[in-house]
Amino acid sequence: MQISRSRDLTVEVRLMSEPCLWRWEIKDRQRDEVVDNSWACEWMAYDSREEAYRAGRKRLIRLTSR
């Protein structure tokens, strides 16, 4: 599910099957690759879609404000 976009980066929120929690990904749309991921990079997952989105959006803002 595509949620928000900044430059060519997109925040996506996905439901994980094991454990049953939500994670965010930041994808580079031009290169079609994941540049950051809450689960693989930080081992963070969230109880709700909204909580995962807020965390992903916060990370996206940090990445793009440099």
Image (tube, grey):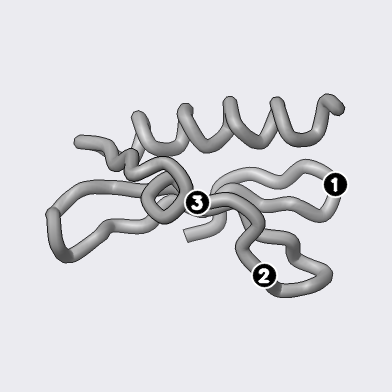
Give the quarter of the image for residue 63: top right
Using the image, tell me which numbered label, if any, was put on residue 7.
1
Eye-nearest disc, 1 or 3 = 3
Around disc 2, counting alpha carbons within 10 Å, would you say few (fewer than 14), some (14 to 19), or many (20 or more)? few
Q: Position of residue 53 (x, y in %)?
A: 45, 37
Secondary structure of the residue carrying tag 2 is strand
Question: Are the residues at dot 2 and dot 1 in contact (C-beta closer than 8 Å)?
Answer: no
Give the quarter of the image for residue 6: top right
Of callouts 1 and 3, the N-terminal one:
1
Using the image, tell me which numbered label, if any, was put on residue 35.
none
* Residue corresponding to mark 3: 37
Secondary structure of the residue carrying tag 1 is loop
Q: Position of residue 17 (x, y in %)?
A: 17, 65
Q: Position of residue 3 (x, y in %)?
A: 55, 48
Looking at the picture, which amino acid does disc 2 mark?
Glu
Question: Are the residues at dot 2 and dot 3 in contact (C-beta closer than 8 Å)?
Answer: no
Q: Quote the CA–CA distance across marks 1 and 3.
A: 18 Å
Q: Position of residue 37 (x, y in %)?
A: 50, 51
Looking at the picture, which amino acid does disc 3 mark?
Asn
Q: Residue at x 67, y 70 (%)?
A: 33
Q: Quote the CA–CA distance across marks 2 and 1.
A: 14 Å
Looking at the picture, which amino acid does disc 1 mark?
Arg
* Residue corresponding to mark 2: 33
Residue at the extreme left: 19
Eye-nearest disc, 2 or 1 = 2
Task: In the rendered view, tell whether residue 24 sits above or below residue 48.
Answer: below
Q: Residue at x 47, y 48 (%)?
A: 41
Q: Residue at x 61, y 63 (%)?
A: 34
- Compared across the picture, whether 59 is left or right of 44 comes to right
Around disc 1, counting alpha carbons within 10 Å, would you say few (fewer than 14), some (14 to 19), or many (20 or more)? few
Of callouts 2 and 1, the N-terminal one:
1
Quadrant (top left/top right/bottom left/bottom right) for the C terminus: top right
